[in-house]
Amino acid sequence: MKGPLFNQDSTEFFYTHSADQMSAEAVDGWVDSLAEAGVGTLFSNTNAMRANYASKVWETDWHGYDPNGPDDQPVLKYLPREDIPGTRRRLDSAKKLAEMGIDFHERAFARCRKLGIGCWVSVRMNDLHDCHLQDSPLLSTFYKEHPELRRVPYRYTGWPDRALDWSQKLVRDHYFAFIVEHLERWDLDGLELDWMRFGFHFGIGRELDGGEILTEWIGEVQKECSRAAKRLGHPVRLGVRVPSTPETARNLGLDGAAWAKAGLVDLVVPTPFWETCEFNMPIRAWQRLLQGSRCALAGGLEIRCQPYRGAPAIMMTPEFAAGAAMAVLRAGADFVYLFNYFADMHLGGQWTKEQYDTVLNAMQSIEALDRLPRRHAVTFRDIHAPGEPWDGALPATGTILAFRLQTGPRPTGRKVEALIEVGSAEAATPELRVNSVLCPEPHRNGATLTWSVPAEALADEMHVVEATATDGKPLTVLRVEFAIGPKAP
């Protein structure tokens, strides 16, 4: 493998290209753009509840859809009106490409081979998009016909309750047939089991028993990878995406460390779920747990940034992405792993192409990232097993508050700033120390305060930001960031 690793929800291609634009050359051009951005390995996602290619064992995304039919046809009528044009565009394009005899993934992988990019497929193991809608085009017939297979059949408090229960053999068999088709259909370097779409796979309190079931099942998948390797004449590796914290992963039945120790997987990707990128993932703990295995380690970056649940969220900026990637590599991960970093959809209009290509190319190494401006943020862990306590650092209230950030190599000779947002524009200005060193008076813009960080405060890998109330009243902090300027040439 080469990094960065790039997970592509391949339906994005169909959202951003019309049916009239469908061609083999269009797929080639899309892969070429990834090569320009420095992507080392493509993880091409093949499914939600349905397949996004002409599968022989699962329904396709366009199953039951009539391109010439009205907007109130069964597979569209339950969608919000504003979502119908984009959905029709996606379905029209995917259907047209398949009818032209072009397999999106096969064509993309062939182009990857020509350009020296690694070729993996990524299978979402329990995708729940639109599970609250009666007949969304994203719901499979299998899912709709088997309500008895739901993870929490006695209530509905949110999408995870409606996940399929992987303790049921019918569920495991449904996915196993799909995976075998992948291994028989394409020339792959690897297969990823994406357990983080959506992260919940067993009944509440049944997760540890479920983990034993998954371990046995993954062993069967690993055998299929070995058969494919023998057929293809090169290794076909097996990877997993799991929760960012080892204990939560185990408590959800997704014990990536145990699978690595057992020799079942070749890649473990600890990652947040979706709400926010997690800048302080315990990568070093994962590294220690994987020691002695053959397993590579990658840190997953999500596309949203949010200081706490319910706070305003933004898409990751180039500086935030560089900061999160630096934290992952400096903590010992082998690779940066990007999820949903769509150049055309989510990043379009926010990043320039130059920024996109520069930042992704830099994610190949610490040295390249260290030349860029980067920003680190206090966010939160957005997935917990049932019964685990909430452990978000923000919002925080007290007279003395401390926050720890993973910040990469010591930023010697750089402009470095610490930023906090307090509860109100009228709050007293706190005293700020970084690694025990007092910072000079800040620049203030309403409730947002920015301090210049003295050179003697700078450290390798970690910085602790300490805010102290100056009026004796409890201080409320809503946001904490640490910004490092570019390295001088």
Image (cartoon, grey):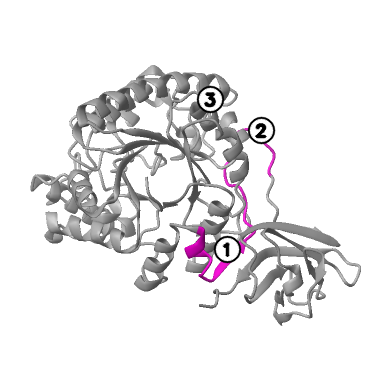
Q: Secondary structure at mark 3?
A: loop
Location of residue 327 in the rendering, given as x and y in whole percent from the top left corner? 57, 55
* Image quadrant assignment for residue 231: top left
Between 333 and 58, the one lying in front of the other is 333
Location of residue 217 in the rendering, given as x and y in whole percent from the top left corner? 41, 21
Residue at the image point whose x is 44% and y is 24% from the top: 166
Location of residue 346 in the rendering, given as x and y in whole percent from the top left corner? 39, 62
Q: Which residue is mark 1?
A: 312
Mark 3 is surrounded, within 10 Å at the Cα level, by few (under 14), some (14 to 19) or many (20 or more) other residues, namely many
Distance of label 2 from label 3 (alpha carbons): 13 Å
Work out whether mark 3 precedes mark 1 in sequence or the reverse, and give the earlier one: 3
User: Quick check: 377 above or below 383?
Assistant: below
Quadrant for the N terminus in the image: top left
Residue at the image point whose x is 70% and y is 79% from the top: 446
User: Quick check: 432 above or below 404?
Assistant: below
User: Residues in magenta?
Assistant: 366-390
User: Magenta stretch: dominant SS?
Assistant: loop
Q: Secondary structure at mark 2?
A: loop
| Magenta stretch encompasses residue 375 | yes
Q: Which residue is mark 3?
A: 203
Give the numbered dot on residue 387.
2
Residue type indicated by callout 1: Pro
User: Quick check: 249 above or below 45?
Assistant: above
Give the numbered dot on residue 118.
none
Residue at the image point whose x is 17% and y is 38% from the top: 54
Answer yes or no: do the residues labelled 3 and 1 have beta carbons within 8 Å? no
| Magenta stretch encompasses residue 457 | no
Distance of label 2 from label 1 (alpha carbons): 26 Å
Residue 284 visible in the snapshot: yes
Residue type indicated by callout 2: Gly
Between 206 and 208, the one lying in front of the other is 208
